[in-house]
Image (tube, coloured by chain):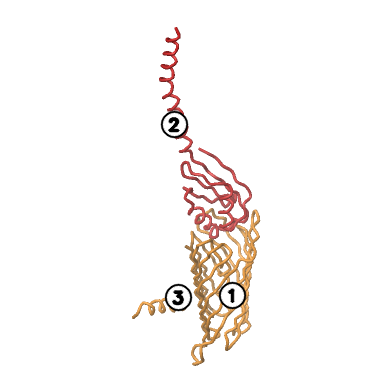
């Protein structure tokens, strides 16, 4: 097997295992790299990006949508439009855009040029968290959209370097999905440069598993 | 008499010069080895995962020996290498690059 096939297999396995809202921090520090891998029962995605500045990042994004039967691969650009730094809170507004190609797997249709645009916003203190993200896809053969929002609370306030835990509730709306609106309770952990989220969606009986690492 | 005074002055200068020189040397060495801790108070630093940027950004500076983040106080504590300097302007730039807003800077030399 050639090396690029190994990489392809690794990506496919990763995708088989990566949703939307953990992506609410799409920009890192200057010269920082971030890998995001997100999964729920309807979709899996992988996103690796590089931040040349603290307001921009660019990278590769791949998403396999199991619910709608399509696969998108492209280049994604993220922009921190505005940040509000307050003594005890921070809020952010992001824009995201990607261009690439999409194919409706399984029905023999051709690959088509595709892309999406999105907006993300979050607000947090050391105790409370709230976020929103919306995306609209043009896949050539189809259009798709989804949005989600989260609220969260930290059961304890950890110091820098501790293991941090958040209890969150996510509501997601995908008009084209079989179950358009879902509620997902989840737990977010982060330690050092790693972030892990585990959740469960009762309506669809699907597991959520998200992972982010920065380096 | 004049000859004696001249000889005395010469002797005094000869004996005291090394002492003065040694004192200056010790003072200069102390100044060079003095370690400065810079405390930058910032706004917006509420998340450990995001504050990792502070360690990364400040850690790349040649003058920086150690970085400590205090989320409770919203402070970044930077220990400089012996004799190294980090200007207020540079600290402000690094705080901005880390994604936060600088409120104030305090310095303490040990």
For the residues marked 2 and 1, what is the alpha-carbon distance in whole angstroms? 61 Å
Q: Nearer the viewer, mark 3 or mark 2?
A: 2
Tell me the shade of chain A.
Answer: orange
Label for residue B29? none
Height in image: A70 above or below B39? below
Query: What chain is tagged by disc 3?
Result: A
Camera-nearest residue between A12 and A50 = A50
Q: Name the residue carrying label 1.
A: A97
Label for residue A14? 3
Camera-nearest residue between A157 and B27 = B27
Element type at marker 2? helix
Height in image: B23 above or below B72? above
Query: What chain is tagged by disc 2?
Result: B
Element type at marker 3? helix
Camera-nearest residue between B20 and B5 = B5
Please state if A82 lies on the left or on the right of A43 as rendered. Answer: right
Q: Name the residue carrying label 2.
A: B25
């Amino acid at each position: 097997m050639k090396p690029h096939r190994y990489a392809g297999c690794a990506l496919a396995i990763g995708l088989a295992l990566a949703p939307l809202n953990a992506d609410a921090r799409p920009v890192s520090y200057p010269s920082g790299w971030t890998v995001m891998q997100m999964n729920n029962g309807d979709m899996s995605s992988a996103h690796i990006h590089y931040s040349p500045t603290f307001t921009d990042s660019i990278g590769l994004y791949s998403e396999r949508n199991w619910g709608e039967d399509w696969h998108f691969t492209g280049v994604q650009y993220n922009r921190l439009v505005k940040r509000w730094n307050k003594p005890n809170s921070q809020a952010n507004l992001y824009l995201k855009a990607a261009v690439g190609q999409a194919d409706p797997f399984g029905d023999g249709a051709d690959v088509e040029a595709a892309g999406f645009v999105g907006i993300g916003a979050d607000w947090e203190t050391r105790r409370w968290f709230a976020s929103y993200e919306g995306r609209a896809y043009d896949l050539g053969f189809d259009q798709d959209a989804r949005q989600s929002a989260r609220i969260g609370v930290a059961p304890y306030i950890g110091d820098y370097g501790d293991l941090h835990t958040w209890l969150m509730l996510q509501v997601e709306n995908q008009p084209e999905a079989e179950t358009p609106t879902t509620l997902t309770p989840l737990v977010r952990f982060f330690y050092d440069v790693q972030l892990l989220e585990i959740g469960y969606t009762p309506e669809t009986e699907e597991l959520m598993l998200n992972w982010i690492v920065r380096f | 008499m004049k000859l004696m005074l001249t000889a005395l002055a010469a002797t005094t200068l000869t004996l005291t010069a090394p002492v003065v020189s040694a004192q200056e040397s010790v003072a200069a060495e102390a100044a060079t080895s003095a370690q400065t801790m810079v405390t930058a108070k910032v706004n917006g630093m509420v998340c450990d995962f995001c504050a990792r940027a502070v360690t990364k950004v400040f850690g790349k500076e040649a003058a920086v020996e150690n970085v400590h983040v205090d989320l409770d106080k919203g402070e970044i504590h930077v220990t400089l290498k012996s004799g190294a300097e980090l200007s207020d302007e540079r600290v402000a730039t690094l705080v901005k690059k880390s994604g936060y807003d600088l409120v104030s800077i305090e310095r303490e030399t040990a």
